[in-house]
Image: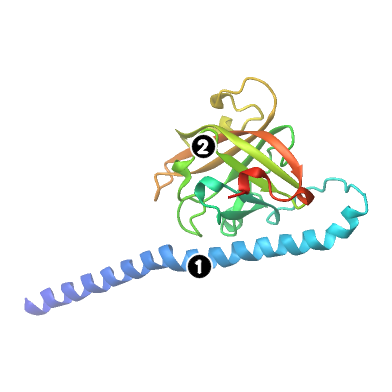
Amino acid sequence: MRVAVRTVSELCITAGTVIVLFVAYLLFWTGVRADDAMDEQIDRLQEQWAADRPEHSAGSTPAPQPYENGRPFAIMYIPRLGFTWNKPVLEGTSASTLKKGLGHYAATARLGGKGNFAVAGHRRTYGDPFKDFPRLRPGDAVVLTDGTTWFTYRVDRGPYRTLPTDVAVVDPVPRKSGCTRPGRYLTLTTCDPEWGHSHRLIVWAHLDRTEPVDNGEPEALRR
């Protein structure tokens, strides 16, 4: 009997250790790897933009290129989440893409374009990019750059809680945001609750202004 009790106790201890290690992996190691991956995407973008700048400075305006699936094309800044908060935006929302940054819903508008530019991000794990998503409030700035232009969006509504099946939140005119006519909108989505995925949190914003990057950082990013 004692042997059986000891064996069960040892199995429980082993199981507990495995669970603790798994949680540590989720909390720490995936975060470390994701942070490295996001830094790599930002470095890649900045190198590409630096290489393209002489051509752009010569007065040529390059034609917009299609976003490539799984590749970065912009950097997002949200001052409300911290002035050091910046994340790469990649094309697509597959699991592998969202491990490297935020993901653009491929069927939605281009950055700064007419319609709804929609972006998803993890709430927890893989760097926790949208961990503080519930802190966002109407009037907050969401700033993006594609290397040539700053796009400053202003939050209109959110965070709004809904179901994953509520795909209308990324419609060209997201009417649940209060919008009633075509415009240039931004939708951000993440999971809810913090460690689950039964629901989604949504924030909607409109394009407030654009500025060339040569003018320096936009006002929203100045401390």
In the figure, residue 6 lies in which quadrant?
bottom left
Q: What amino acid type is highlighted by mark number 2?
A: Ile
- Whether residue 148 is visible here, answered yes or no, is no
Residue 152 screen position, x and y as percent: 66, 40
Q: What amino acid type is highlighted by mark number 1?
A: Val
122 relative to 24 in the view: left or right: right
Check the image and report above or below for 196 versus 156. Answer: below
Check the image and report above or below for 190 versus 25. Answer: above
User: Toward the viewer: 148 or 89?
Assistant: 148
Q: Which mark is residue 75?
A: none
Name the residue carrying label 2: 202
At a point 66% along the width and 30% down the height, the residue shown is 172
In the figure, residue 38 lies in which quadrant?
bottom right
Name the residue carrying label 1: 32
Extreme-top residue of the structure? 180
At a point 48% along the width and 65% down the height, the residue shown is 30
In the figure, residue 183 lies in which quadrant?
top right
Disc 2, SS: strand
User: Toward the viewer: 104 or 163?
Assistant: 104
At a point 71% along the width and 64% down the height, the residue shown is 44
Residue 82 screen position, x and y as percent: 51, 52
The quadrant of the picture occupied by the N terminus is: bottom left
At a point 78% along the width and 58% down the height, the residue shown is 49
Number of other residues with Cα within 10 Å of mark 1, as a class: few under 14, some 14 to 19, many 20 or more: some
In three-dimensional space, the C-alpha distance between marks 2 and 1, rounded to whole angstroms, equals 26 Å
